[in-house]
Amino acid sequence: MLIEDDLTLVEMYKEKLKNSGYRVLTVTDSKLAMQRIRTGADLILLDILMPNLNGFEVLKRVKSDEKTKHIPVIVLTNIGSESIDNDKKLAFSLGAIDYMIKSLNTPESIVQKIESVLN
Amino acid sequence: MLSAIKKNLTDSDWRINSPSPDFQDNSLSEIFDELIKIDDLEVVLERGAEKVLRVLNAYSVSIALMNETKDALDIKIICSRCGKREPRNIKSFKLGSGVAGLAAQKEQYVYVNDITKSPLFICKNGREKGSILAVPLIFNHEVVGVLSISFDFPESIAKPTPALTVLALIIAATVANSKLLDREKELAKLKSNLVATATHELRTPLTAVRGYLSMLKDGDAGILNSKQYLYLNKALSSTDRLVSLVEDLLSTLRIDEKKVVINTTNFDLSKVIENVIDNLRSKADQKKIHINYRKKAKIFVNADSNITYHILQNLLDNAIKYTPDRGRISFEVSKKSKIIVSLTDTGCGISTKDQKIIFDRFSRVANKLSTKAGGTGLGLFIAKNLAETQGGNIWVESIPDQGSTFYLSLPLASN
């Protein structure tokens, strides 16, 4: 499941993931995220800076819900930094399994990360 | 302005001839020095009020500051012999109202000899006798507040003494200074938010550009012909440079704001060096540069592994950029009071003059390879700052046309 509010990026990641053989559910309104996640997902790609409900809040809810807390979450964001930042620390403390900066990772490297997590 | 005031105080013979034993040894200049160092406005006011209370042996001292709209004074501090206390029935004076309000409006001191008989005394606090002297706090021709001193008896001090005038000026100057600092902090915060937002807004379209270009390269839209592939590689390479620039700017901002978060652990440095080499090997291979690292036993250091990776990656990336084709780069690790990693290249070298500036921000050395190599001139500035933040350092030794050795020191692993 891809939770992302930028429609260009939604289209791009969806295309890449479909080409790589994945079925992708997209959520562009983070307020609806929990409702959709509860219907089931093998993995969540989660943006942070979104209107209404930010990704950290979504992550907190995913990890505190018995029905969803087992789902691996990869934070995929353009805020913070992969090496020298508090945002990454916060994401891990809330239960994310990875923190990736979108501009530093190509769609292919995100697919590779998903594969390594799911396998 | 502040330094001019201080000079006047230092040069002046005004030393307070007060009977108070606490004050005899303190010059006004020393009080100024003490107050001006304090950033926190609340502390400035508290210390200032305490000083006046002690010097004049007063019943109580209060300081009220002009509000934002400059139509009233808000009481910020009241100090009495029993200590600091909160304002009771009145928390602010309109301009022209009460002793303090009148002093602010008239921009001169107001004295009430008997508080029980004056309509000006509006702070009805149950006191049956006493006098009050309100001195405006004026700095740079502007009333910033009022210092009010209450005495137990009438006829105490009916007008500001030279010492009190100077003390009022010192408090006014430190209040103005502290407000200026607050404004600077506010501006710095605004700048920080602006740059953070701009960084996010720059990264997002870059993600789409880089993402779609790399999908084209990976064949997601079909097979490309050789010319399309060539053009695509050029576009990707320029996009990568733009991505690096945004990242460097973001790192510089974090360093400036002291927001670099260090997670120090004991880790094997050899493994980090190997990862850095693996990551940049294909770049070195393109120039047929040989990277040599003879791995020894595990070398443990006490630092942040991500940051160390970032620094070494920057140093190796630079070495590859500035080493001509078929050159050599070698890593060595030695143990002294710290662990020292040295990275020697057979590149174009750096002159003694340039060695002094290469760690400054935006510094780029002009030579035959630098134009081709590109870069923002921020990489070494960031690397040095990150090294220092985790208790290490970076320095360079170089001979032009022969090569350079960059050294990174890291703290030894803790037991």
Image: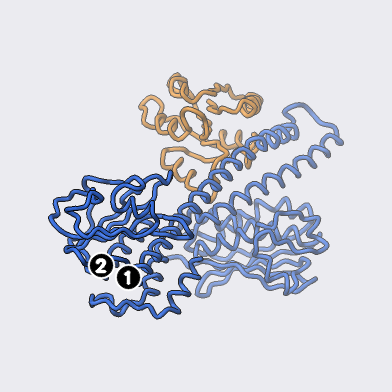
Chain colours: A orange, B blue
Q: Position of residue B286 (x, y in %)?
A: 78, 52
Mark 2 crowdedness (10 Å alpha carbons): few <14, some 14-19, many ≥20: some
Q: Chain of mark 2?
A: B
Left or right relative to A59: residue B78: left
Q: Amino acid at mark 1?
A: Thr
* Identity of the residue drawn at 14% across and 54% down: B127
Q: Position of residue B169 (x, y in %)?
A: 40, 65
State whether residue A53 is above or below residue A82: above
Alpha-carbon span between mark 2 and mark 1: 8 Å
Q: Nearest the camera: B380 or B117?
A: B117
* Identity of the residue drawn at 52% across and 75% down: B336
Q: Element at badge 1?
A: loop
Q: Chain of mark 1?
A: B
Q: Amino acid at mark 2?
A: Ile
Mark 2 and mark 1 residues within 8 Å of each other at the beta carbon = yes
Mark 1 crowdedness (10 Å alpha carbons): few <14, some 14-19, many ≥20: few
Q: Position of residue B374 (x, y in %)?
A: 76, 54
Q: Position of residue B362 (x, y in %)?
A: 68, 58
| Residue behind mark 2 | B157
Q: Quadrant of residue B19?
A: bottom left
Q: Element at badge 2?
A: loop
Residue B161's disc is: 1
Residue B84's disc is: none
State whether residue B105 is above or below residue B410: above
Discs 2, 1: same chain: yes
* Identity of the residue drawn at 45% across and 53% down: B182
